[in-house]
Structures are given as structure tokens and as C-alpha cells.
Image (cartoon, rainbow, N blue to C red):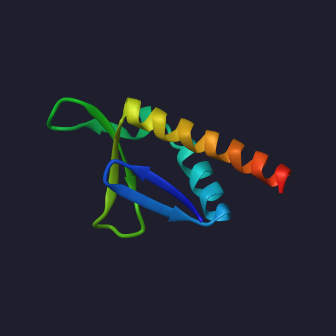
């Protein structure tokens, strides 16, 4: 089981689900999907299967989120080589 912990959110995935989720988010362009929020910042909304629950990221958060997932994939590859 793989987990993504971000502030008060905890997402849980199997390795294949995690890989699919990473590919999905990696294909999303911040510029194409962001819009201004009332606080004046640009944010991207990541919709979930539950229409009442969505994740919102600033540009910096989005970049950090995607970088962390890529690093996790590298660690999974290293783990697979060692096992």
C-alpha cells in the first residue's frame, strides 16, 4: 500500500493505482486547468470520483506534489530491484 500525505489529506493506493494516478496528474497542465480563486491566487482543481470532494493546489503545491510522486516511483523501482 502506498500513501500520499498532504496536510490533512491521506490518499491510499496499491502500486498499480499509484502509477495510474501519477500518470494522470502528470498529464495535467497547471496552466490549462488553473483559475483564479477569491484570494487572488491561481489554483488547479483535481476532481475525485466523489463530486463533493476535490483537491486544490497552488502552482508551488502542484509542482511539489508531482515531484514527490515521481520520486516515489523511483523508490518503488529501487525497492523492486532489491527484493
Left or right of 18, for residue 9: left
The quadrant in which residue 2 appears is: bottom right
Q: Residue at x 49, y 37 (%)?
A: 29
Determine if residue 40 is in view: yes
The quadrant in which residue 69 appears is: top right
Residue 80 percent location from the top left of the image: 80, 54
Q: Residue at x 39, y 30 (%)?
A: 60
For the N terminus, the image quarter is bottom right
Left or right of 1, for residue 4: left
Nearest the camera: 63 or 81? 81
Residue 33 percent location from the top left of the image: 40, 41
Q: Residue at x 62, y 49 (%)?
A: 23
Residue 22 percent location from the top left of the image: 59, 50
Left or right of 28, for residue 37: left
Nearest the camera: 77 or 31? 77
39 to 17, vertically: above or below: above
Q: Residue furthest left?
A: 38
Amino acid at each position: 500500500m502506498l500513501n500520499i500525505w498532504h496536510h490533512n489529506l491521506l490518499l491510499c493506493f496499491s502500486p498499480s493505482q499509484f502509477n495510474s494516478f501519477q500518470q494522470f496528474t502528470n498529464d495535467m497542465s497547471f496552466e490549462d486547468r488553473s483559475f483564479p480563486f477569491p484570494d487572488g491566487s491561481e489554483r488547479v482543481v483535481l476532481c475525485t470520483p466523489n463530486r463533493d470532494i476535490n483537491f486544490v493546489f497552488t502552482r508551488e503545491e502542484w509542482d511539489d506534489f508531482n515531484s514527490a510522486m515521481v520520486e516515489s516511483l523511483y523508490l518503488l523501482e529501487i525497492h523492486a530491484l532489491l527484493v
